[in-house]
Amino acid sequence: MLIKEFRVVLPITVEEYQVGQLYSVAEASKNETGGGEGIEVIKNEPFEGKDLLGGKYNKGQYTYKIYHLESKVPTFIRMLAPKGALAIHEEAWNAYPYCRTVLTNPDYMAGNFTLCIETMHAPDNGCQENVHELPPDKLKMREVDIIDIAGDPVMPRVEKCEVLAYHRYGHKRDH
């Protein structure tokens, strides 16, 4: 089992982030829903009584979505992929500031693929050592990456990419 913790420090408040997150999710769902492709929303309803993070959070919004990825991958992958391999099921219990998201692929991988994402939005600079309240055995397995979006220096190779993005290649035009 891999336990990876990303501590993402943002230059905005938790409340500002929540507004942006709700807007982004609504826009993505609107833009990717319909026609049997994109995001299929199966359920979107309030939940109560599911204990999350040791019972600290037990009500919020439950969503069950299926991501149909057929149109998002190259044709040769679509041709090679077995039936059901390109449909990811997502169950999410959003009890903001805590959210648990579980991704599965029941049509192809059955119980062999589960990705659990637990998110805690904390009003700090990423300094809490065990925000997810992991037991000692899982805490030993955990790997932490701190990402400071506003303060991390830009790596030189990224700067070169940005410069190259504006450089024109190809045929010269005659004027």
Image: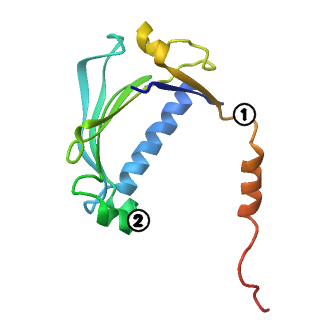
Q: Name the foreground residue: 140 vs 127.
A: 140
Q: Is residue 7 left or right of residue 22?
A: right
Percent across and percent down for residue 68 are: 30, 54
**Which residue position holds label 2?**
74
Dot 1: what SS?
Answer: loop
Displayed quadrant of residue 103: top left
Dot 2: what SS?
Answer: loop
Badge 1 crowding class, 10 Å Cα cut-off, few under 14, some 14 to 19, many 20 or more, is: few
Q: Residue at x 76, y 68 (%)?
A: 167
Q: Residue at x 75, y 88 (%)?
A: 173
Considering the image in quadrants, where does the N terminus appear?
A: top left
Q: Amino acid at mark 1?
A: Asp
Label 1 near label 2: C-beta < 8 Å?
no
Residue 152 marker: 1
Displayed quadrant of residue 74: bottom left
Task: Choose the circle earlier in sequence order: 2 or 1.
Answer: 2
- Compared to residue 76, the image places residue 121 above or below, namely above
Alpha-carbon distance for marks 2 and 1? 34 Å
Q: Name the foreground residue: 75 vs 154.
A: 75
Displayed quadrant of residue 94: top left
- Is residue 113 visible to us here? yes
Residue lying farthest to the bottom in this orientation:
174
Q: Is residue 173 left or right of residue 118?
A: right
Percent across and percent down for residue 120 are: 47, 22
Q: Name the foreground residue: 175 vs 5.
A: 5
